[in-house]
């Protein structure tokens, strides 16, 4: 169950020319919750594809570590496999 605007504004902020460095740790914290992981793993949002370039981000170690942590946390989501993408 989502409250407020959800992940959409955070994922949109990743598309900005200079996303805030605190966005990485925020996504990492959110991905600790099952709802956060499911939101990031939702194929229709293409969140993982949007996060991957930030794993090699040289300008902000804080953002890079946070994104890597969020992706790592998503590895702990189990259950029904989403199957092949479109």
Image: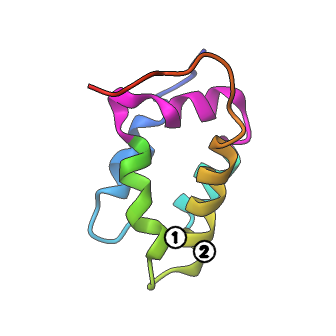
Residue nearest the viewer, comparing 13 with 66 = 66
Residue span colored magenta: 30-46
**Residue 84: x, y in percent?**
38, 26
Q: Is residue 52 magenta?
A: no
**Residue 1: x, y in percent?**
60, 14
Q: Residue at 37% across / 49% down in the picture? A: 49
**Pointer 2: what residue?**
62
**What is the crowding at mark 1: few (fewer than 14 residues within 10 Å), some, or many (at least 20)?**
some
Question: Relative to 19, does residue 85 appear above or below in the rendering?
Answer: above
C-alpha distance separating marks 2 and 1: 6 Å
Q: Residue at 33% across / 47% down in the picture? A: 12
Task: Report whether residue 44 is seen.
Answer: yes
Along the horizontal axis of the image, is 52 left or right of 29?
left
Residues under numbered marks 2 and 1 in contact, where contact means CB atoms less than 8 Å apart: yes
Residue nearest the viewer, comparing 46 with 63 = 46
Q: Earlier in the sequence, mark 2 or mark 1?
A: 1
Q: Is residue 43 magenta?
A: yes
Q: Residue at 57% across / 65% down in the picture? A: 22
Judged from the image, the secondary structure of the residue bearing numbered disc 1 is: loop
**Residue 29: x, y in percent?**
70, 49
**Pointer 1: what residue?**
21
Question: Relative to 26, does residue 20 appear above or below in the rendering?
Answer: below
Q: Residue at 57% across / 80% down in the picture? A: 61
């Amino acid at each position: 169950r989502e409250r407020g605007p959800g992940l959409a504004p955070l994922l949109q902020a990743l598309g900005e020319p200079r996303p805030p460095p605190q966005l990485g740790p925020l996504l990492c914290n959110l991905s600790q919750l099952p709802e956060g992981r499911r939101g990031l793993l939702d194929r229709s949002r293409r969140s993982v594809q949007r996060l991957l370039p930030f794993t090699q981000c040289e300008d902000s170690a804080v953002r890079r570590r946070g994104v890597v942590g969020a992706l790592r946390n998503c590895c702990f989501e189990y259950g029904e496999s989403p199957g092949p993408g479109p």
